[in-house]
Amino acid sequence: QVQFVETGGGLVQSGGSLTLSCEASGSIFNGFGWAWYRQSPRNQRELVASITYGHVTNYADSVKGRFTISRDNAKNTMYLQMNSLKPEDTAVYYCNRGITPDSPFALSWGQGTQVTVSS
């Protein structure tokens, strides 16, 4: 049973923009913080940005000023607006519940969405 789905990835040139979406069922989305992660073949999965149910946000240093995380609780959806993309942003992007990598609220990982930034 799919509990949430990541969409919006694609191929973009360096300096370009993409917006990712993470849509979940209401029963698992509301009341919880959520986060975006990414993983590339050479790197372990890393936390990119997180947002609490009350919209308090946190970002990895590598994306501060370029990425914006947001959520629409009425639509059970979280977003990641990515601007000024760099080749090093190339990765599979995942969302999950909780705002830390070791969150006890985390769910099974989804398929993710591939983001590829060409130089």
Image (cartoon, rainbow, N blue to C red):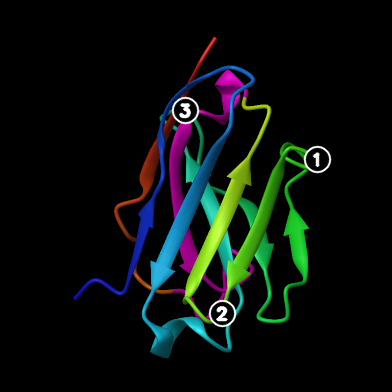
114 or 7, nearer to the observer: 7
Q: Is residue 92 magenta?
A: yes
102 or 74, nearer to the observer: 74
Residue 64, horizontal then vertical, whole percent: 78, 42
Q: Residue at x 53, y 86 (%)?
A: 30
Q: Which residues are magenta?
A: 86-106
Mark 2: which secondary structure? Answer: loop
Q: Residue at x 68, y 27 (%)?
A: 84
Which amino acid type is shown beneath numbered disc 2?
Asn
Disc 1 designates what residue?
65
Which amino acid type is shown beneath numbered disc 1?
Gly
Disc 2 designates what residue?
73
User: Which mark sits nearer the N-terminus, 1 or 2?
Assistant: 1
Mark 3: which secondary structure? Answer: loop
Mark drawn on residue 42: 3
Number of marks drawn: 3
Question: Extreme top residue here?
Answer: 119
User: Which mark sits nearer the N-terminus, 3 or 1?
Assistant: 3
Q: Is residue 103 magenta?
A: yes
Residue 115, horizontal then vertical, whole percent: 44, 33
- Neighbourhood count class around disc 3 (C-alpha, 10 Å): few under 14, some 14–19, many 20 upward: few
